[in-house]
Image (cartoon, rainbow, N blue to C red):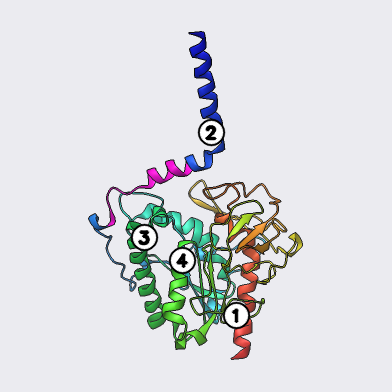
Amino acid sequence: MKKFLVILGIVVAVLLILGYIFRGALQVGVGLYMMQPDAGFAETTPPQQPDYTLASNWAALPNRDDVADRIPIANTAALQSAASVDVFYVHPTTLLGGAGWNQALDDEEINQRTDYSTIMGQASAFNACCRVYAPRYRQATLLSFFSPQGDGGDALELAYGDVVQAFRFYIDHYNDGRPFILAGHSQGGFHLDKLLGDEIAGTPLQDKLVAAYPIGYYIDDSNGIPVCQSAEQTGCQATWNTLSLEARSGGPADSICVNPLNWSANGEHAGFEENLGSVSFRRNQGIEDNYPDVELGVVDAQCRDGALRISEIRSKNYDGYFITEGNYHIYDYSFFYMNIRQNAVARSNAYLAKK
């Protein structure tokens, strides 16, 4: 009996050690299982197609008060009403699970999650330069990115169709010939990469493109848009994926990486002093908006092996990570919020000065 207990103790100890070592993989596995839709894509009925004539199918419009108007308390007011440039912003994945592969646009819980996380925390970075247009779309569930050749690919294709439809509606009914910025994150960056190739590159609209920020997805320059090499270059694209120095990159080593602290793609390190301010918008008790101060010098940055590497986080407000430790995907905008905000203004002014 004693020998059995010793062996049992050893087995339990080994399992605990293995569980600790592979805790990230275990968490991912459990998470993916919990996200699994009830049936395959072909066996489900897609949610109703959006009608973009309805204001309710836009998360942000410049002629109304919405969370894209929010600003950090240390900054000046939003300037949408006086802006000469537009931004078309595509939000990242906020559908983390559920019965289907794509979001129903009347799901208010998901819409609120989208608004008070990504629209307020990302799209608002452009309200100093631009009128903000952000469509709701039948976004694909997060699990889609783990099965891109099967059900997930079908879900992403449906979502992309909505983005194209929304962009064409924006051009036909809202744009009125104005210059524009394209911006997004994660799933939004994925869709913008395709949109740039399908709808912008090689068309008259390319002359109206101030810049593109398809952030948070590993892409190359095959969409036909040049990579930004300086802070005031126009007609170019800038993107990055934020990781620690030690974290394993999730994309090819030749993926586009433009450093948002110096707007260079040559791998030059940018120090903490070049970070104009990180902003972590949070929702206070699920009701009121909480505007934190801008925090200077939270991270440094350097492009390396197709990813944006940071050496340290000098703040307690950014203690999470995405799926695996050292992956700061969720802070791709937050870490560099004020640099993005300033750069969007600089590129807009540079574009307007040439016209």
| Between 161 and 80, the one nearer to me in the picture | 161
- The amino acid marked with disc number 3 is Gln
Give the Cα separation between the discs numbered 3 and 4.
Answer: 15 Å
- The amino acid marked with disc number 2 is Leu
**Mark 1 sits on what residue?**
348
Residue 35 shown in magenta: yes
Q: Looking at the magenta stretch, what is its main secondary structure? A: helix
The spot of residue 57 in percent (x, y) is 36, 66
- The amino acid marked with disc number 4 is Phe
Q: What residue appears at the point 63 percent right and 61 percent down from the top-left corner? A: 308
How busy is the neighbourhood of tag 3: few (under 14 within 10 Å), some, or many (20 plus)?
Answer: few
- Whether the residues at callouts 3 and 4 have beta carbons within 8 Å, the answer is no
The tag earlier along the polypeptide, 2 or 4, is 2
The spot of residue 305 in percent (x, y) is 62, 62
- The amino acid marked with disc number 1 is Ser
Give the Cα separation between the discs numbered 2 and 1.
Answer: 52 Å
Please report the bounds of the magenta region as a residue range. 27-41
**Mark 4 sits on what residue?**
190
Residue 149 bears which disc, if any? 3
Q: Nearer the viewer, mark 2 or mark 4?
A: 2
Give the Cα separation between the discs numbered 2 and 3.
Answer: 31 Å
The tag earlier along the polypeptide, 1 or 3, is 3
How busy is the neighbourhood of tag 2: few (under 14 within 10 Å), some, or many (20 plus)?
Answer: few
The spot of residue 215 in percent (x, y) is 54, 66
**Mark 2 sits on what residue?**
18
Where disc 3 sits, the SS reads loop
Where disc 1 sits, the SS reads helix
